[in-house]
Image (cartoon, grey):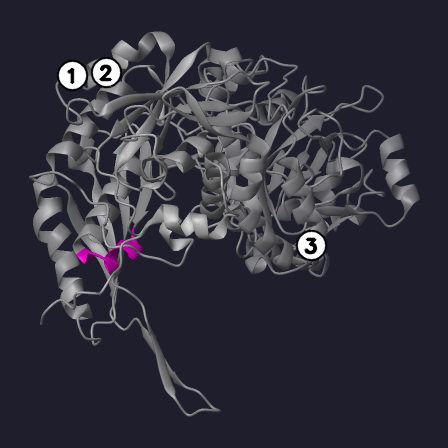
Amino acid sequence: MATKAPKLLPFDAVACLEQVCPAPVADAALLSEAIRRVFLMPAVGSKSFLITIGDRTVGGLTARDQMVGPWQVPVADVAVTATGFTLDGKSRTGEAFAMGEKPTLALISPAASARMAVAESLLNLGAADILNGLERIKLSANWMAAVNQPGEGAALYEAVHAIGEELCPKLGIEIPVGKDSTSMKASWKEQQSGQTKSVVSPVSVVISAFAVVGDTRKTWTPRLRRIEDVGESILLFVDLAKGFQALGGSALAQSFGRIGDDTPDLRDERGDDILSDFFDALSQLHETDVVLAYHDRSDGGLVTAVAEMAFAGRCGVDIILDGIAKSGSRADVLGALFNEELGAVFQVSKGRETDFKRAFSTCGPPAGMIHTIGVVKPKHDQTMTVRHDSRVLVRLERTQLQQWWSRTSFEMQKLRDNPVCAESEFAAVADSEDPGLSYKLSFSVRDTLLPLTAPIAHLFGKMPRVGILREQGVNGHAEMAFAFRAAGFDAIDIHMTDLIDGRSLAEFVGLAACGGFSYGDVPAAGMGWASSVLMHDDARREFEKFFKRPDTFTLGVCNGCQMLTRLKELIPGATNWPSFVENTSQQFEARFTMVQITDDAAATPSVFLHGMSGSSLPIAVSHGEGRARFSSPTALQALEGDHLIPIRYVDNRLKVTELYPFNPNGSPNGVAGVRSKDGRVLALMPHPERTVMADVASYVPPGMSEQWGEFGPWIRMFRSARRWVG
């Protein structure tokens, strides 16, 4: 079977752009149009509309998710999870996961497409502190082809051979698992014309790369650090393509409906030296504090990589193409900015350039392939400037660039969700004065709050017992149990079936109703959970006795919060509690957003919030029904008058808000949680238990984890409960 060579035409970027731009067109207008078209491509632009509807914090071990930095921009190269829950804070190992795919390149060269998919996954994975370099990495390959189509079987063979027999064995990387779909052809018959038509998917492979992480805290992100935070810095570009700048298969070509006839590739005589040496250098750099930010050059090219770094840092950059673009001609500038060959961008403090290059002194790219390509501007100048030979080619505002980049995601979100919410989130991109997420704490995270009797209790192994309550589908019990265990409790798993079958709550001082997908997270799942209590006499009686005991406390989170608020008839001092219903966005919301804690002195102190009043800090949100709905306006007024709304959503300026996405569900007056009058019951929709470990959060300011120790700020809630028990 022979490969069917396609008949492809060269891609002339300049000619294509000049056709769509009014003549005569200035360089700035031409480059601006090129950037706009590329940023609107689905493969390049923001994927926020997909990311925010998936629960990515469940389990309490997610150390690096897609969202990066104080402004939560979806540009992370790698996903990192902690290995497990630890009480000593000494073990920071984890697992890293990254992907690579280059299906469009297969239309030009199936082998190059496969090699580039592997290389992309490795460069993404390089953002994590990979233990023992390449040799510990494992790949999963998902192959897709229409093998019965002429030439496609041969193309698949060419691609598999390129990485299965050549590249990966030379790198010492195994592909122990994968999947194949070999019928990627759809055929149908038109009803009116009777014609038979078909669509054939090109050969492609999606690579998933996995590795063990030595230290989760050493994961790099694309977020550029501002001058005001780290001083002057430079952007260094490591070119792994030896100066080649093929535009075939690029996002720029696709934006014109073209493919091109030249393709990016792993340009190495043996196929493994460049990547092996590059990872050796990365390993050395992860042992230092030289690198401030990192991003690979992939979909969209160098200009996209740098722009995404600027979005995550909410800052401006000055890009200098001298040494990268062969000349200042339009063709060479476009080639330099939009080719998708292998390479990566690093931010390094101005005085650390020598330290950075020292890591590459015995390994890394060929000589002359490390380029200083720019600097980060002061925060008041949020523009991206592109220069060549001291000539400004284009200058664009970050707000304009990021709204281009976010536009496709926004339009999809607007069609799918409440359009008012989509427009509110899109408009927030333009707020250049937004300070982002922050931690304003009224307490010391290291303060254990252990009661005087705790050492004696630990000595005899009689820690107070907390029931970790689950119902069908609940998946947040592990992190909840760990949070209480870390605070000095004995956490005991209880299922609702145990209570319905007659198990007593008499042995417990605390009860925690967990979050997660109870009953598959169908609408009103919390109501269903509450009904399983109210409709079973024995269970109802047991809960009522527990709530009335003055020596007990209860915590409800997410679905557990919904359940508790539906049991308010059994809970003393909960008369005016709301129920929690569908988010205003009409969509499941998975966010990392700000809340403010106000445990007013006029009320009996909350069991859970000792010393936390006045604090503002981020918290994980993950629910589809979190909007507080009160039976009447007077119920909300009464609850506020009794100081029973201790947790509210605030914007990044720390003002109580109903504005989306800062308030992810539209609760009136920012209501995120409610408490009982005696302070023994707290019900809240966000998840404090999911970021208890210091290393586990979507955003922690650099160096803050070291100040906190092994646990993050939300451990305080559980330690407060332990203090109250005494």
- Residue 298 left/right relative to 131: right
Q: Residue at x 33, y 15 (%)?
A: 290
Left or right of 518 in this view: 296: left
Instruction: Mark 3 and mark 2 in contact? Answer it, CB < 8 Å.
Output: no
- The answer, for residue 234, to whether it is visible in the render is yes
Quarter of the image where one finds residue 152? bottom left
Task: Give the CA distance from mark 1 to mark 3.
Answer: 54 Å
Percent from the top left, x then y, of residue 191?
47, 90
Q: Residue 109 magenta-drawn?
A: yes
Label 2 element class: helix
Q: Pick the residue in front: 342 or 448.
A: 342
Q: Image check: 375 left or right of 102?
A: right
> Residues at badges 2 and 1 in contact (C-beta under 8 Å)?
yes
Q: Which three-letter amino acid code belongs to the residue tagged 1?
A: Ser
Is residue 490 placed above or below 151 in the rendered structure?
above
Specify few, some or many for label 1: CA neighbours under 10 Å numbering under 14, 14-19, or 20 or more: few
> Identity of the amino acid at label 3?
Asn
According to the image, label 2 marks what residue? 357
Is the residue 600 above or below the residue 476 in the image? Answer: above
Q: Quadrant of residue 88?
A: top left
Q: Which residue is mark 1?
A: 361
Query: Does residue 584 show up?
Result: no
Residue sitting at the far right: 634
Look at 25% across and 48% down and name the residue there: 117
Quickly name the residue at label 3: 418
Callout 2 amino acid: Lys
Q: Residue furthest front?
A: 24
At 16% from the left edge and 16% from the top edge, which residue is drawn? 361
Q: In the displayed structure, would residue 25 be above or below residue 146?
A: above
